[in-house]
């Protein structure tokens, strides 16, 4: 079953920041969609999608695309039965990047570095 809230650690990982920075931001901005369970904030998938300026479905697809690690499911260490939250973000990114099908990678622009403003914000393309 898909979870519709993520813990602070996972939410920060999705956003590419640390839990401390994300918690400070949550406390200062007080966005809707934050639930506190057992003194731990849980962030709605809809709130994360709004922060990332995407749809909840797109975010769910992104989080579920990884074959090796699904951020929507807790990672359990079978020897201790504890949730494993000690995966460095670069390993999560590497796992995610390796799960992207080649046909999707082939559709990415080859001038993305030079024209990132064009692809992100619609600015005119820069000449090469």
Image: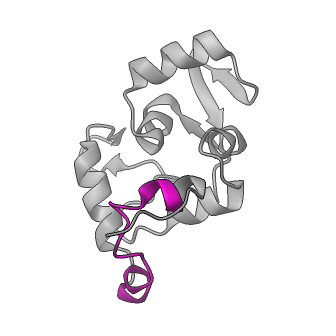
Q: Residue 78, how many percent across, how many down?
A: 29, 51
Q: Is residue 39 left or right of residue 88?
A: right
Relative to 93, residue 29 above or below: above
Report if residue 55 lies within the magenta region. Answer: no
Of residues 127 and 116, the one nearer the viewer is: 127
Of residues 120 and 44, the one nearer the viewer is: 120
Q: Is residue 63 left or right of residue 54?
A: left
Relative to 2, residue 41 above or below: above
Report if residue 105 lies within the magenta region. Answer: yes
Q: Residue 68, how many percent across, how many down?
A: 34, 67
Relative to 84, residue 8 above or below: above
The residue at the far right in this view is 32
The residue at the far front in this view is 127
Q: Quadrant of the N terminus?
A: bottom right
Q: Quadrant of the C terminus?
A: bottom left
Q: Which residues are magenta?
A: 102-118
Q: What residue is drawn where x is 35% and y is 74%?
A: 99
């Amino acid at each position: 079953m898909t979870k519709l809230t993520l813990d602070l650690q996972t939410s920060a990982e999705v956003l590419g920041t640390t839990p401390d920075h994300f918690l400070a931001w949550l406390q200062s901005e007080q966005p809707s969609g934050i639930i506190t369970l057992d003194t731990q904030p849980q962030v709605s998938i809809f709130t994360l999608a709004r922060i990332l300026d995407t749809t909840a479905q797109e975010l769910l697809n992104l989080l579920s695309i990884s074959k090796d690690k699904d951020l929507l499911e807790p990672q359990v260490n079978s020897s201790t039965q504890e949730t494993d939250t000690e995966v460095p973000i670069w390993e999560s990114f590497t796992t995610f990047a390796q799960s992207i099908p080649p046909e999707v990678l082939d559709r990415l622009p080859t001038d993305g570095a030079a024209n990132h403003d064009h692809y992100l914000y619609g600015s005119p393309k820069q000449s090469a």
